[in-house]
Image (spheres, grey):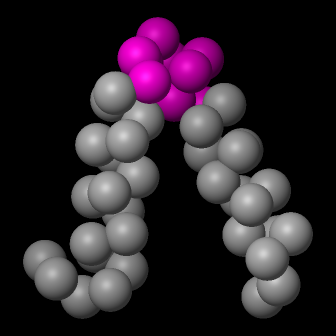
Amino acid sequence: MNIASIVQKLWNYCNVLRDDGMRYGDYVEQLTYLQSIRSGVY
């Protein structure tokens, strides 16, 4: 997976969150949670 595809997936996810009415701060919280899951913290 290259950087461009990662960035595109991130923007796609942000668009979903925005369309659901989330604020910028909520984006950061959700993205941090997803990163934690991906890295095996939870």
Q: Residue at x 71, y 44 (%)?
A: 12
Quadrant of the frame with the C terminus: bottom left
> Considering only vertical position in the picture, is 3 above or below 29?
below
> Considering only vertical position in the picture, is 11 above or below 37?
above
x, y (%) of residue 13?
A: 61, 45
- Please give left or right for residue 8 compared with residue 12 in the image: right
> Considering only vertical position in the picture, is 6 above or below 28?
below
Magenta stretch holds residue 20: yes
Magenta stretch holds residue 15: no
Q: Residue at x 27, y 58 (%)?
A: 33
Quarter assignment of residue 23: top left
Which residue is most to the left? Answer: 42
- Please give left or right for residue 39 compared with residue 13 in the image: left
> How many marks on residues?
0
Quadrant of the frame with the N terminus: bottom right
x, y (%) of residue 39?
A: 32, 86
- Please give left or right for residue 32 compared with residue 41 in the image: right
> Considering only vertical position in the picture, is 2 above or below 21?
below
Quarter assignment of residue 10: bottom right
Q: Residue at x 72, y 69 (%)?
A: 6
Magenta-colored span: 16-24
Q: Residue at x 51, y 29 (%)?
A: 17
x, y (%) of residue 2?
A: 82, 84
